[in-house]
Image (cartoon, grey):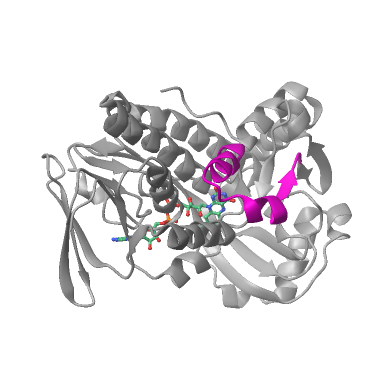
Amino acid sequence: MRTQVAIIGAGPAGMFLAHLLRRHDIDAVVIERRDRAYVEGRVRAGVLEQVTVDLMHRLGLAERLVREGLVHGGTNLALDGEVFRIDMAALTGGSTVTVYGQQEVMRDLFDAAQADGLAIVWNAADVTLAGLDGDRPTVTWREQGEARTLDCDFVVGCDGFHGVSRGAIPEDVRKTFERVYPFGWLGILADVPPADHELIYANHERGFALASMRSPTRSRYYIQCGVDEDVADWPDERFWDELCVRLGPAAAAKVTRGPSFEKTIAPLRSFVTEPMRWGRLFLAGDAAHIVPPTGAKGMNLAVSDVTMLGEAFVDHYRDRSDAGIDGYSARALARVWKAERFSWWFTSVTHRFPTMDGFDRRIQMAELDYIRGSQAAQRTLAENYVGLPLSPA
Ligand SMILES: Cc1cc2nc3c(=O)[nH]c(=O)nc-3n(C[C@H](O)[C@H](O)[C@H](O)COP(=O)(O)OP(=O)(O)OC[C@H]3O[C@@H](n4cnc5c(N)ncnc54)[C@H](O)[C@@H]3O)c2cc1C
């Protein structure tokens, strides 16, 4: 088997890239370790930046997004129970974010892939990359016990944090940068109306809480918890009680309680690997970087990476220019590090750290109070939250 671009992983990064390449008649094959139901079923991101929404429109994938997505022109912060709103649209010249679950994005990507006949290999076991520093890379895997080989011009590792691609870059070339946070997020989904039509990020002395949603009838709530805690210790009533304390009385009065149908604890981490290209291997999305979910940047970064990489492949195949390919790593990392900074900062000012003393707590409260009173501070937050523009080529 032969193709131009082999894409490892059918998550958001891999599938957006496959659609982008198809629009420019560049051949690609996506090789995925799991099946469609697994990838589509993972409950993860929910807030789309304008960059992501724009790409879905360009790819003709936005029909359901326009119908069902919830456009947010603002977001709320709560400081020890007192809620204030940041008018993101007014502060950024009209930019917004759209709440539309990653599961819905994946469904749209897979439905369109099926209709367009995009090549996806499901349930590929033992994926192995070879020849990445030469002219003829290969990808091998096992499919129902049979060995398969794909020859290609380039390999793109879109296989997430636990994939194989990042490890194919030699250790003496690869640099990693990491922060592991001393807490996690306990998240639930419940079919009850959300507390507010926009998100509420709450800093409370007992810890962080987030009121979010997936639709007008489905709520997504999170509270900061210990990484080693067991979800079994968090029956629904305990979760709702703690959430309401942290959101404060005004927001808590608008919380509708109901049975949760999903409850998980996610660890928080910041991670970047450099470079994002080695020989004929490119990394995109979570394969190269992780952000804590506070800034809602993970999936959006995956999309901005592959948007830049897609442009680079078009330059290579259509215009015979390798400038985009050669500049990809630096260009992508410039945006990645800004999103890393924002996600780290937003996590730092909204969470309770175990080592925090009275001084740290007052500095944190002063920072949030400063945001409440300063248009300049609000604009900085809003500009980062709605998503920075793609780095120039
Ligand atoms: C609780 C939570 C909340 C989040 N909230 C947000 C949010 O609001 N906004 C946001 O933008 N982001 C958010 N994120 C992050 C977002 O979900 C990820 O950043 C996004 O899924 C990254 O996409 P990806 O395609 O790079 O990687 P992934 O989604 O991890 O996809 C990788 C794919 O590669 C496959 N794979 C792995 N190994 C192999 C292999 N060896 N061979 C072949 N295939 C392989 C996997 O099965 C998977 O399908 C959140 C994440 C979590 C956990």
- Using the image as rendered, state which of residue 46 and residue 136 is in the foreground: 136
* Residue at image coords 51%, 48%: 299
Query: Measuring 31% from the left and 49% from the top, which residue is drawn there?
Result: 157
Observer able to see residue 353? no
Find out whether residue 156 is within the magenta segment.
no
Q: In the displayed structure, would residue 308 be above or below residue 141?
A: above
- In this rendering, the answer to whether 322 lies above or below 80 is above
Quadrant position of residue 23:
top left
Q: Is residue 349 left or right of residue 29?
A: right
Mark yes or no: residue 364 visible: yes
Decide if residue 88 is on the left or right side of residue 298: right
- Pick whichever, 249 or 5, lies toward us: 5
**Quadrant location of ligand 1?**
bottom left
Residue 69 lies in the magenta-colored region:
yes
Q: Is residue 145 left or right of residue 62?
A: left
Query: In what quadrant of the picture does the C terminus appear?
Result: top left
Q: Residue at x 77, y 24 (%)?
A: 374
Where is residue 383? Give x, y as percent.
Answer: 64, 29
118 and 51: which one is in front? 118
Where's residue 350, x and y in %?
Answer: 66, 44
- Where does the image place residue 120, in percent across and percent down from the top left? 34, 61
Q: Which residues are magenta?
A: 49-74
Q: Quadrant of the N terminus?
A: bottom left
The image quarter in which residue 384 lies? top right
Q: Position of residue 11 (x, y in %)?
A: 43, 56
Residue drawn at x 37%, y 53% as measured from the top left: 161
Q: How many numbered tags mark residues here?
A: 0
In the picture provided, is 245 more to the left or to the right than 264?
A: right
